[in-house]
């Protein structure tokens, strides 16, 4: 049986991508974090908040105590303001300080209209429908289509790496010359490259996973010559080291190659307003 013929996980019986997380999968240790988050979001955002979602390892049930981030997506009734973003950062910082279970936080803020817009249907819309777990409010997935692991989804999720690389180079150049300063860059870029490598092959692999090591193995099955690079990136995505040589290789070799191959196979992501 060829790699292209194997039926993969992450799909329902009809071949659509299944939503990967749920509140029922939240590990017990993280229950108090989720409860406090739900209560405080209402206090902070009130009527401005349309709905709130968890994503990442906590709703997938794979979070590690003291190692995992609290990842949130907020849909507001209007376009988020600077004050909204400041409030989200302050809330995340307060939760991070209070609960030892989490190590870091991140909150994405968008308007309801943008999340349901045509241009975001196969990017942010897919993200909400398949990778986000409803926490508060009306679930926007009800207004979004079902998704298959096809080339359109691949293009619109990660087909913008070439546009990102100049920004990555600037971030690396502007960072302090210390391992501590480089470590979060290694973590972020490692994860992004692994996910991009996976979605490059996703239509042929025909399934979905959010596990970095499974993503790297899927990629390596189709690109064995680059497989070790992505396997190493998957390790650094979970246990980052602030190695300047790694960052240089990401923006000088692996990143440009991956961007070029992605454009050749799937095309380039549609520009956003």
Image (cartoon, rainbow, N blue to C red):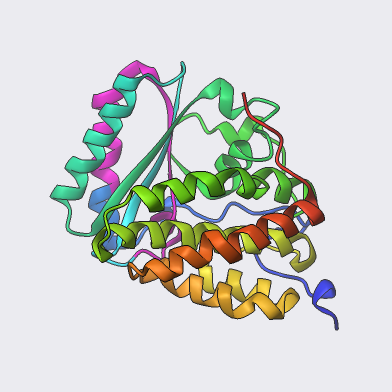
Which quadrant of the view contains residue 187? bottom left
119 relative to 103 in the view: left or right: right
Which residue is at the front of the view, 175 or 158? 175
Q: Is residue 86 above or below residue 248?
A: above
Q: Which residues are magenta?
A: 34-63
Residue 119, position as x, y percentages in the image: 68, 29
Query: Would residue 208 be seen by someone viewing this image from the given angle?
Result: no
Which residue is at the front of the view, 2 or 20? 2
Query: Would residue 112 be seen by someone viewing this image from the given angle?
Result: yes
The residue at the point 68 percent across, 47 percent down is 159
Location of the C terminus by quadrant is top right
The residue at the point 70 percent across, 27 percent down is 118
Q: Is residue 272 above or below residue 102?
A: above
The residue at the point 66 percent across, 61 percent down is 258
Location of the N terminus by quadrant is bottom right
260 relative to 272 in the view: left or right: right
């Amino acid at each position: 049986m060829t790699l292209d013929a194997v039926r993969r996980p992450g799909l329902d019986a009809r071949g659509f991508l299944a939503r990967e997380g749920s509140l029922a999968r939240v590990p017990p240790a993280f229950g108090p974090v989720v409860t406090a988050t739900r209560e405080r979001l209402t206090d902070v955002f009130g009527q401005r908040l349309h709905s709130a979602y968890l994503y990442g390892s906590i709703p997938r049930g794979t979070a590690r105590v003291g190692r995992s981030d609290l990842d949130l997506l907020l849909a507001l009734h209007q376009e988020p303001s600077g004050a909204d973003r400041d409030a989200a950062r302050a809330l995340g910082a307060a939760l991070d300080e209070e609960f030892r279970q989490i190590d870091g936080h991140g909150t994405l803020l968008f308007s309801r209209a943008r999340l349901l817009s045509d241009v975001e249907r196969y990017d942010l819309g897919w993200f909400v429908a398949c990778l986000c777990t409803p926490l508060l409010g009306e679930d926007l997935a009800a207004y979004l289509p079902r998704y298959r692991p096809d080339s359109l989804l691949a293009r619109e999720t990660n087909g913008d790496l070439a546009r990102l690389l100049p920004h990555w180079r600037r971030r690396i150049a502007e960072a302090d010359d210390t391992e501590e300063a480089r470590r979060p860059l290694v973590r972020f870029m490692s994860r992004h490259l692994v996910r991009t490598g996976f979605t490059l092959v996703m239509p042929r692999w025909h399934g979905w996973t959010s596990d970095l090591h499974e993503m790297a193995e899927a990629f390596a099955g189709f690109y064995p010559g680059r497989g070790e690079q992505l396997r190493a990136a998957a390790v650094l995505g979970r246990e980052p080291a602030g190695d300047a040589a790694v960052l240089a290789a990401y923006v000088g070799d692996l990143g440009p190659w991956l961007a070029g191959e992605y454009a050749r196979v799937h095309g380039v992501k549609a520009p956003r307003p």
